[in-house]
Structures are given as C-alpha cells and as structure tokens.
Image (tube, rainbow, N blue to C red):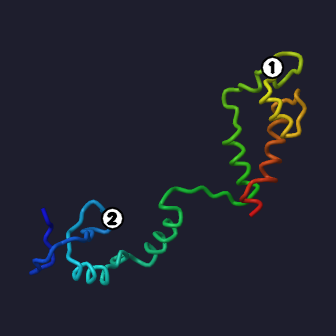
Amino acid sequence: MENICEWKNCNESGKFKAPLEKDNSRSYKWLCEEHIKSFNKNWNYFDGMSQKEIENFVKSDLTWHRPTQKFGSSDNFFNILWNNALSDKFNLFKENKIFNSSNNKKLSEKDKDAFRIMGLKFDADWSSIQKKFKTLVKKFHPDRNS
C-alpha cells in the first residue's frame, strides 16, 4: 500500500517521513518530495525553547544526553578509574595467600607472565600490585598520552 502525502490538498505519493513532534521519533507523517523539502527548510527543533534550554540541550548532546561525572583533574580521573577497576570488594586478594605469601600455592604461567610484564616479584602483595598498576595506567593511558 502506497502512502499519500499528508500535506493539505496534496495527492502525491508520500515517500518521506516527517516527525509530528520533536521529541517523538515514532510519530510521523508521510510527505511527498516537494513537501518534505518545504518541511525540512522550515523545521526548527529549538522553536519554543529559551536560550538557556537550547544551551543545555547542546551541552547535553555532547555526551549523547547521557549522565556524566566531573573528574576535576587528570589525577582525580585516575583515582576514579582506579577505584572502579581494581576494587577488591570481597577481599579476595587480601585473604588470598597467593598474594600475601610466596611459600603457598604456585602461580600459573599466565600469572607469572603478568608479574613479569608489570615488573613485579612473584611474591608481591596486593598493595604493591595496585600501586604498580596505577603507575602503569598513568604512564600508558591514551588520555594522558595523546
């Protein structure tokens, strides 16, 4: 079934969608090529908005209208990253003897490789691992080196 242009007194084929409301992309009308051009030429998303509302929209659009968090400084950014990336909420590493004593369970080859890459001794404690990781993140993170 072919759509008919919904412009007043037009019977052309409606092949183009035009929004009925600016905040509802699911609600639209069908227009012909001539009328969609006219519609688009006169369309103003910001019509009826105050200057402050427009500025807030543009600012929010920079992050796709998603909530953001102030980092304040790059040091604060890495503290937030650090707390989220390597938090030991369940104290798995503090209670794990592997990370607190070298004479218990042996490390796998992958674990040993990770310790070598990070430049740590195999008997490093969790605090040392965290400190080294933080140093390496600060050194190699693309946001700090671009």
Question: Where is residue 55 shown, x and y percent of the image?
Answer: 48, 74
Q: Which mark is residue 97?
A: 1
Q: Crowdedness of circle 2 by 10 Å Cα count: few (<14), some, many (20+)?
A: few
Residue 31 locus on image (x, y percent): 20, 74
Q: Which quadrant holds the N terminus? A: bottom left
Q: Do the residues bearing badges 2 and 1 touch, measured as CB atoms within 8 Å?
A: no
Q: How crowded is mark 1: few (under 14 residues within 10 Å), some or many (20 or more)?
A: some
Q: Which amino acid does label 1 sit on?
A: Lys
- Residue drawn at x 40%, y 77% is 50
Which dot marks residue 23? Answer: 2
Return the x and y of residue 143 as percentages of the image width and height.
72, 59
Which disc number belongs to residue 65? none
Q: In which quarter of the image is residue 128?
A: top right
As drawn, is 78 to the left or to the right of 7?
Answer: right
User: Which numbered disc, 2 or 1, marks the residue that appears first in the sequence?
Assistant: 2
Please indicate whether residue 143 sits to the left or right of residue 131 in the image: left
* Vertical relation: 133 (above or below) 65: above
